[in-house]
Image (cartoon, rainbow, N blue to C red):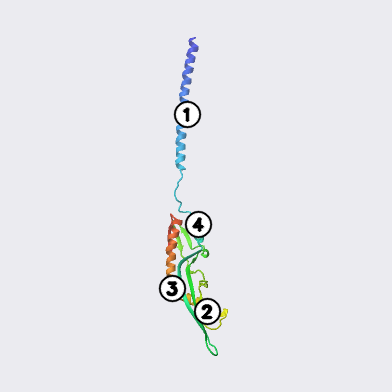
């Protein structure tokens, strides 16, 4: 009986050692797997920052074009226009007063595709030249005759209307007023575009 018992004791002791070895191997494998997983997670960590390389130009242009016509200076004017027609016995005279508001600005829908461009962390804006936004600036509802003798046709009144229109353009569309409107355009565009372009910096070009 001693022989089988001794054999069983040795077998049991060997199995215990195998169990210990297996446990050790499992622990080492678990540690290795955890280390690999940790390394992988660190290597693939997401960066939640702003990518300044993204071109935001199309978005900015689309937002700005949605404004349509942007007025930067409005000038109220009135003109007294008179005309005289020489007759055989007497002269006929017509004096009319015209009122108008000339609006100077930019029609953003007609701007070129490259007036706004992005380079790295800066948005460059070339401000278009300001212009008269509406050529029908005379308020015909307020136009009235100040003095009138004789009979005048629609053609006569139309000629006076065109004369008043030319006078208003000459009086209001001066270099000084255009420069004021252009300066206003630069300042207002800079203030409007900066929040849209952030975190990029908006630079208005001369």
What's the residue at 45%, 34% (across, down)?
A: 32
Pointer 4 residue: 59
Point out the image quarter for the C terminus. bottom left
Q: CA distance from mark 3 to mark 2?
A: 26 Å
> Which mark is on residue 175?
3
Residue on which disc 1 sits: 26
Q: Foreground: 184 or 33?
A: 184
Q: Earlier in the sequence, mark 3 or mark 2?
A: 2
182 left or right of 162?
Answer: left
Q: Are marks 3 and 2 in contact (CB under 8 Å)?
A: no
Q: Which residue is mark 2?
A: 160
Q: Gap in Å between the C-alphas at discs 4 and 1? A: 56 Å
> Which residue is drawn at the image coordinates 45% and 61% (left, top)?
124
Dot placed on the residue nearer the N-terminal end, 1 or 2:
1
On the rendered structure, is 204 left or right of 112?
A: left
Question: How many residues crowd around disc 4 within 10 Å: few (fewer than 14), some, or many (20 or more)?
Answer: few
């Amino acid at each position: 009986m001693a022989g089988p018992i001794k054999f069983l004791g040795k077998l049991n002791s060997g199995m215990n050692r195998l169990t210990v070895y297996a446990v050790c191997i499992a622990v080492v494998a678990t540690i290795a797997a955890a280390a690999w997983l940790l390394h992988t997670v660190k290597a693939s960590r997401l960066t939640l920052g702003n990518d300044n390389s993204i071109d935001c130009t199309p978005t900015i242009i689309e937002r700005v074009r949605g404004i349509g016509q942007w007025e930067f200076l409005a000038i109220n004017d009135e003109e007294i226009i008179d005309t005289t027609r020489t007759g055989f016995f007497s002269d006929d005279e017509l004096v009319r007063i015209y009122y108008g508001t000339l609006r100077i600005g930019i029609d953003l829908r007609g701007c070129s595709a490259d007036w706004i461009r992005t380079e790295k962390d800066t948005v460059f804006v070339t401000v278009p030249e300001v212009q008269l936004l509406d050529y029908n600036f005379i308020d015909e509802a307020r136009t009235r005759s100040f003095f009138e003798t004789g009979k005048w046709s629609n053609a006569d009144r139309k000629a006076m209307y065109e004369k008043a229109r030319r006078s208003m353009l000459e009086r209001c569309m001066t270099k000084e007023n255009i420069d004021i409107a252009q300066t206003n355009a630069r300042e207002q565009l800079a203030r409007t575009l900066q929040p849209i372009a952030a975190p990029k910096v908006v630079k208005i070009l001369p």
